[in-house]
Each structure stands twice: as structure tokens, then as C-alpha cells.
Image (spheres, helix red, strand yellow):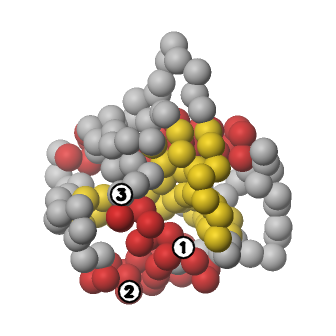
Amino acid sequence: MKVPATEKRPLILVTNDDGIEAKGVHELAKMIEDLGDIVVVAPDSPRSGQSSALSVGIPLRLNLIEHYRNISFYRTNGTPVDCVKLSMNQLFDRRPDLLLSGINHGSNSGVSIVYSGTMGAALEGCIIGIPSIGFSLTSHEPDADFSPCREIVRESCKKVL
């Protein structure tokens, strides 16, 4: 089940804490699809407030649910940090060039950074040596407009890559 390593294009891991069905993670993947090979690994349901939590005592599942163009979407029953660890241990033959977490529905600022699953995943990437960025939008609307994030996301990713 390993994602084949290609040295020609950057490998970008995308995750979140709002779950695989959240609009923000899909919009984020679309915003960067031309920058590399995109692999989205996200929880099967919202895991907000999970910080750097790991799942213990339960078997973790990882299922490919969709693939189009150069974006693959995987769902897991774990936390955002589990998404990072599962990706590294079960999907990839090489270290991703970039880890993105979000786009979160709601702000991750101030003390919220400590509790945020979105930021927990980004911090996990940093801990294991992957350049990582967490993105948020200050809207909790399920159908929020993420278009104002597009240029910030793209410029940030290009600079890191």
C-alpha cells in the first residue's frame, strides 16, 4: 500500500482535524494540486481539540477512498497525529517534502494552538523533520468560502518547497 516514490515532483502530505469530509481539506488539496503529488490522510470524523493525541488500544485503519489526477484521499479512524504517523509508516517510501494541515474551520491562534488537532499534526511534522504549515479560516460555516486563502496558501507552499 506504499505510495511510489518519484523524485521528479514534490510529495505533499495534507491532513486536518475537521475530518475527511470537511470542505477545507478538499479546498486545500485543490489549491496546491499543481505543486506536487498530493496525499490527503484525514480522520473519518472531526477530531478538533485532539492536540498531539495518539490512538492507543485500538487498531487503526487506513483506506483509500478516492484518487483523481495527482491527489489521493485516505480516511483513517485515528487522530490528526495518527494521520501523520500512519502516512510515514504505511504509505510513503520517502519523506514528504511538505506537510500541510487544514484548512481548519475556525481560528487556530493564541492558546488554541496548544489544543488544536490541526496544529498538533503540523507540529508532529516539525518534530519528525518535515517542513509543516497549519492553515485556518475564521469561519465555522460548513460551506465557508476558502478562496481568500488561496494566494496565501500557494505563496507559503512555494516558499517552503
Amino acid under disc 3: Ala
In the rendered structure, the answer to whether residue 91 lies left or right of residue 78 reads: right
Secondary structure category for the residue under label 2: helix
Residue 12 appears left or right of 103: right
For the residues marked 2 and 3, what is the alpha-carbon distance in whole angstroms?
Answer: 20 Å
- On the image, the x and y values in percent for residue 157 come to 50, 75
Marks 2 and 1, how far apart in space?
Answer: 14 Å
Residue 153 is left or right of residue 130, and the answer is: left
Which element carries disc 1, helix, strand or loop?
helix
Looking at the image, the residue that sits furthest to the top is: 57
Q: Quadrant of the C terminus?
A: bottom right
Contact check, label 2 and label 3, Cβ < 8 Å: no
Q: Of the residues under marks 2 and 1, which one precedes in the sequence?
A: 2
Q: Position of residue 24 (x, y in %)?
A: 35, 64
Residue 139 figure quarter = bottom left
Three-letter amino acid code at the position of disc 2? Glu
Q: Nearer the viewer, mark 2 or mark 3?
A: 3
- Residue at 72% across, 40% down: 90
Which image quarter is the N terminus in? top right
Q: Which residue does the image show at 60% across and 32% down from the upper left?
A: 61
Label number found at residue 138: none
**Residue displayed at 71% across by 54% down:** 95
The mark found on residue 22 in the picture is 3
Residue named by callout 1: 160
| Residue 17 visible in the current orientation | no
As rendered, which of 39 and 120 lies closer to the eye? 39
Classify mark 3: helix, strand or loop.
loop
**Mark 2 — residue?**
151
Which of the pair 104/62 is nearer the observer?
Answer: 62
On the image, the x and y values in percent for residue 30 come to: 49, 76
Q: Nearer the viewer, mark 3 or mark 1?
A: 3
Q: Is residue 56 above or below residue 135?
A: above
